[in-house]
Amino acid sequence: MTSLDENDHGFKAISTQNWQEADLPILFPDLNSDQWIASCLHAVTDPCVPKEVRSLVEVARASIIYGWFFYPLLTLGSEQCQRCLEAGARARCSQLGLPTSRQRKNGTVAPTTFNDHIARLAKAGIIQPAQEELWTASRKLRNRSSHPECQAVITPGMAVRTLDSSIQLLNRLFLTDPK
């Protein structure tokens, strides 16, 4: 078993000797690889979620799974989940004919924001009031992770909960019929 190599980052320094060695069991010795992978494969995106968004989710899932070998990938996978939700909100707005771009004062066209999509989907009754807070929290987390001051590190449980929650939100988003 590998220990954290000496470095100033606080996580394993990848080398030619350790790149295939498990990282998570060092910090979470009661966790085995079968349990880990099963927990990451638990939630499944519904086929009604567009293929492009499902593909983004699978990148998030794989990053979290490979966090077994390099702990910081848990954080990157969780951050990818926030991007999945943004892409899902944009795709759902597009499906419903809700604006996904706006004209700037100078005449150029710019994409509308994640916040705009959340608000439009909530107004259309697609995002329920009880879930709007989760969507807003996701937007804030996405913003925070896009402008980091330092490397964030989250726990395996947090990563799996983020993945599961994101998949549930996406499934509900695309299963909900407009009123």
Image (cartoon, helix red, strand yellow):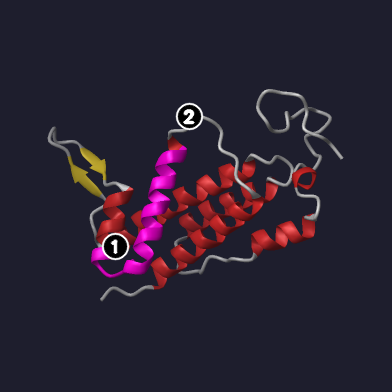
Can residue 141 be seen? yes
- The amino acid type of the residue labelled 2 equals Glu
Element at label 2 = loop
Identify the residue under disc 2.
Answer: 149
Q: Whole-Å distance between the Cαs marked 1 and 2?
A: 31 Å
Q: Which residue corresponds to mark 1?
A: 121
> What percent of the width, then of the height, locates residue 107?
14, 36
Mark sitting earlier along the chain (1/2): 1
Judging depth in this view, the residue of 134 and 116 nearest the camera is 134
The correct choice, above or below, for 160 with respect to 102 in the image is below
Q: Tell me, yes or no, whether the highlighted magenta stretch contains residue 131.
A: yes
Judging depth in this view, the residue of 70 and 58 nearest the camera is 70
Relative to 44, residue 154 above or below: above
Picture coordinates of residue 164, whole percent (x, y): 56, 62
Q: Position of residue 127 (x, y in %)?
A: 33, 66
Secondary structure of residue under mark 1: helix
Q: Would residue 147 appear left or right of 76 to someone viewing this image?
A: left
Q: Is residue 59 left or right of residue 89?
A: right
Question: Magenta segment range?
Answer: 122-145
Task: Quarter of the image for the C terminus: give it.
Answer: bottom left
**Other residues around mark 1 within 10 Å, as few (<14) / some (14–19) / many (≥20):** many
Picture coordinates of residue 7, whole percent (x, y): 72, 23
Tell me which corner region of the image, top left, top right, bottom left or bottom right, holds residue 22: top right
Residue appearing at x 26%, y 47% in the figure: 112
- Residue shown at the point (63%, 42%) measured from the top left: 73
Which residue corresponds to the image point at 32% horizontal and 63% vertical from the top-left? 95
Rendered image quadrant of residue 135: bottom left
Tally of numbered discs: 2
Q: Quadrant of the N terminus?
A: top right
Decide if residue 86 is in sight here.
Answer: no
